[in-house]
Amino acid sequence: MQDGVAVIRVNNIEVGSMPISQYEEIVKSVKKDWRTRVAAVFSYVGFVWKFIIRLWSYFVQCFSVLFALFMLYSLFHPAEITQFIDEMRSLPSENIANGIRSLTNICILVTIMSYAISFLLKGSPVFVSASENAINKKIREVMEVPAEGQVSITFKRDGLNSVR
Protein backbone atom coordinates (compact mmCIF):
# COMPACT_ATOMS: atom_id res chain seq x y z
CA MET A 1 0.00 0.00 0.00
CA GLN A 2 1.17 3.47 -0.80
CA ASP A 3 0.96 6.18 1.78
CA GLY A 4 -0.30 9.52 0.63
CA VAL A 5 -3.48 11.39 0.02
CA ALA A 6 -5.56 11.96 -3.10
CA VAL A 7 -7.20 15.38 -2.93
CA ILE A 8 -10.44 15.45 -4.94
CA ARG A 9 -11.71 18.59 -6.65
CA VAL A 10 -14.96 18.95 -8.59
CA ASN A 11 -15.20 22.04 -10.79
CA ASN A 12 -12.01 23.36 -9.10
CA ILE A 13 -13.63 23.19 -5.65
CA GLU A 14 -11.99 20.88 -3.14
CA VAL A 15 -14.58 18.38 -1.94
CA GLY A 16 -12.42 16.06 0.13
CA SER A 17 -9.54 13.63 0.16
CA MET A 18 -8.97 9.90 0.41
CA PRO A 19 -5.98 7.60 0.80
CA ILE A 20 -4.23 6.79 -2.46
CA SER A 21 -4.76 3.08 -1.81
CA GLN A 22 -8.54 3.61 -1.72
CA TYR A 23 -8.36 5.61 -4.95
CA GLU A 24 -6.36 2.83 -6.63
CA GLU A 25 -8.92 0.24 -5.48
CA ILE A 26 -11.70 2.33 -7.01
CA VAL A 27 -9.78 2.55 -10.29
CA LYS A 28 -9.15 -1.22 -10.35
CA SER A 29 -12.76 -2.08 -9.56
CA VAL A 30 -14.09 0.26 -12.24
CA LYS A 31 -11.66 -1.03 -14.88
CA LYS A 32 -12.57 -4.66 -14.06
CA ASP A 33 -16.27 -4.03 -14.66
CA TRP A 34 -17.37 -5.48 -18.00
CA ARG A 35 -19.82 -2.63 -18.58
CA THR A 36 -16.98 -0.12 -18.44
CA ARG A 37 -15.04 -2.15 -21.00
CA VAL A 38 -18.05 -2.29 -23.32
CA ALA A 39 -18.58 1.46 -22.89
CA ALA A 40 -14.88 2.04 -23.65
CA VAL A 41 -15.16 0.04 -26.87
CA PHE A 42 -18.20 2.07 -27.89
CA SER A 43 -16.41 5.34 -27.11
CA TYR A 44 -13.42 4.29 -29.27
CA VAL A 45 -15.75 3.25 -32.09
CA GLY A 46 -17.64 6.52 -31.76
CA PHE A 47 -14.42 8.53 -31.93
CA VAL A 48 -13.26 6.69 -35.06
CA TRP A 49 -16.74 7.02 -36.58
CA LYS A 50 -16.69 10.82 -36.03
CA PHE A 51 -13.30 10.96 -37.74
CA ILE A 52 -14.58 8.96 -40.73
CA ILE A 53 -17.75 11.06 -41.01
CA ARG A 54 -15.73 14.28 -40.96
CA LEU A 55 -13.43 12.98 -43.70
CA TRP A 56 -16.42 11.87 -45.79
CA SER A 57 -18.06 15.26 -45.28
CA TYR A 58 -14.95 17.07 -46.51
CA PHE A 59 -14.71 14.73 -49.50
CA VAL A 60 -18.33 15.35 -50.52
CA GLN A 61 -17.90 19.10 -50.02
CA CYS A 62 -14.81 19.09 -52.24
CA PHE A 63 -16.60 17.13 -54.94
CA SER A 64 -19.58 19.51 -54.73
CA VAL A 65 -17.35 22.57 -55.01
CA LEU A 66 -15.59 21.17 -58.08
CA PHE A 67 -18.96 20.35 -59.68
CA ALA A 68 -20.26 23.85 -58.85
CA LEU A 69 -17.15 25.40 -60.41
CA PHE A 70 -17.72 23.29 -63.53
CA MET A 71 -21.33 24.50 -63.68
CA LEU A 72 -20.23 28.11 -63.18
CA TYR A 73 -17.70 27.73 -65.98
CA SER A 74 -20.43 26.29 -68.22
CA LEU A 75 -22.52 29.43 -67.72
CA PHE A 76 -19.83 31.69 -69.17
CA HIS A 77 -18.33 29.33 -71.78
CA PRO A 78 -21.14 27.20 -73.27
CA ALA A 79 -19.33 26.56 -76.56
CA GLU A 80 -16.31 25.05 -74.83
CA ILE A 81 -18.53 22.86 -72.63
CA THR A 82 -20.35 21.59 -75.73
CA GLN A 83 -17.01 20.74 -77.33
CA PHE A 84 -15.89 19.02 -74.11
CA ILE A 85 -19.04 16.86 -74.03
CA ASP A 86 -18.61 15.91 -77.71
CA GLU A 87 -15.00 14.88 -77.06
CA MET A 88 -16.02 12.88 -73.98
CA ARG A 89 -18.54 10.92 -76.05
CA SER A 90 -15.87 9.81 -78.51
CA LEU A 91 -13.27 8.82 -75.89
CA PRO A 92 -12.71 5.17 -74.95
CA SER A 93 -14.00 4.10 -71.55
CA GLU A 94 -10.45 3.73 -70.13
CA ASN A 95 -9.79 7.44 -70.65
CA ILE A 96 -13.09 8.36 -69.01
CA ALA A 97 -12.27 6.08 -66.06
CA ASN A 98 -8.84 7.72 -65.75
CA GLY A 99 -10.50 11.15 -65.70
CA ILE A 100 -12.88 10.07 -62.95
CA ARG A 101 -9.97 8.55 -61.03
CA SER A 102 -8.00 11.79 -61.38
CA LEU A 103 -10.97 13.81 -60.14
CA THR A 104 -11.31 11.45 -57.16
CA ASN A 105 -7.59 11.74 -56.37
CA ILE A 106 -7.84 15.54 -56.45
CA CYS A 107 -10.82 15.39 -54.07
CA ILE A 108 -8.93 13.06 -51.72
CA LEU A 109 -5.90 15.36 -51.72
CA VAL A 110 -8.02 18.43 -51.01
CA THR A 111 -9.88 16.49 -48.30
CA ILE A 112 -6.66 15.58 -46.52
CA MET A 113 -5.36 19.13 -46.79
CA SER A 114 -8.62 20.64 -45.53
CA TYR A 115 -8.75 18.18 -42.61
CA ALA A 116 -5.17 19.07 -41.69
CA ILE A 117 -5.99 22.79 -41.81
CA SER A 118 -9.13 22.18 -39.75
CA PHE A 119 -7.04 20.23 -37.22
CA LEU A 120 -4.59 23.12 -36.95
CA LEU A 121 -7.30 25.78 -36.61
CA LYS A 122 -9.86 23.99 -34.43
CA GLY A 123 -7.53 21.71 -32.50
CA SER A 124 -7.69 18.00 -31.94
CA PRO A 125 -11.04 16.22 -31.78
CA VAL A 126 -12.28 15.46 -28.28
CA PHE A 127 -12.15 11.86 -27.08
CA VAL A 128 -14.48 11.04 -24.21
CA SER A 129 -13.04 8.21 -22.13
CA ALA A 130 -15.75 5.96 -20.73
CA SER A 131 -13.42 4.57 -18.06
CA GLU A 132 -12.45 8.07 -16.87
CA ASN A 133 -16.11 9.02 -16.68
CA ALA A 134 -16.90 5.87 -14.69
CA ILE A 135 -13.98 6.49 -12.31
CA ASN A 136 -15.08 10.10 -11.80
CA LYS A 137 -18.67 8.99 -11.17
CA LYS A 138 -17.55 6.37 -8.62
CA ILE A 139 -15.34 8.91 -6.83
CA ARG A 140 -18.23 11.37 -6.66
CA GLU A 141 -20.41 8.58 -5.20
CA VAL A 142 -17.80 7.67 -2.57
CA MET A 143 -17.23 11.32 -1.66
CA GLU A 144 -21.02 11.92 -1.73
CA VAL A 145 -20.70 14.85 -4.11
CA PRO A 146 -23.96 15.48 -6.00
CA ALA A 147 -22.42 17.96 -8.47
CA GLU A 148 -21.55 16.97 -12.00
CA GLY A 149 -18.50 18.44 -13.64
CA GLN A 150 -14.79 18.13 -14.14
CA VAL A 151 -13.09 16.01 -11.50
CA SER A 152 -9.41 16.60 -10.84
CA ILE A 153 -7.29 14.62 -8.42
CA THR A 154 -4.05 15.78 -6.85
CA PHE A 155 -1.83 13.15 -5.27
CA LYS A 156 0.20 14.30 -2.29
CA ARG A 157 3.09 12.05 -1.28
CA ASP A 158 5.99 13.10 0.89
CA GLY A 159 5.41 16.78 0.12
CA LEU A 160 5.27 16.22 -3.66
CA ASN A 161 2.18 16.91 -5.74
CA SER A 162 1.07 15.25 -8.95
CA VAL A 163 -2.18 15.83 -10.81
CA ARG A 164 -4.47 13.46 -12.71
Image (spheres, rainbow, N blue to C red):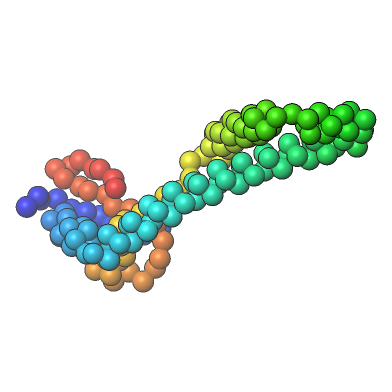
Question: Above or below — where is 40 with respect to 65?
Answer: below
Res 82 → quadrant? top right
Residue 77 in sight here: no
Q: Residue at x 28, y 70 (%)?
A: 141
Please state if 52 lies on the left or on the right of 149 as rendered. Answer: right
Position in image of residue 51 (x %, y %): 49, 46
Q: Nearer the viewer, residue 59 or 153?
A: 59
Q: Residue at x 50, y 47 (%)?
A: 52
Question: Above or below — where is 162 with respect to 41?
Answer: above
Question: Above or below — where is 8 with respect to 147?
Answer: above
Res 135 → quadrant? bottom left
Q: Nearer the viewer, residue 92 or 110?
A: 92
Residue 71 in sight here: yes
Position in image of residue 89 (x %, y %): 79, 34
Please state if 90 lies on the left or on the right of 142 as rendered. Answer: right
For the image shown, how many numbered marks are present on the structure?
0
Q: Residue at x 39, y 68 (%)?
A: 147
Position in image of residue 38 (x %, y %): 30, 62
Q: Nearer the viewer, residue 139 or 5?
A: 139
Res 96 → quadrant? top right
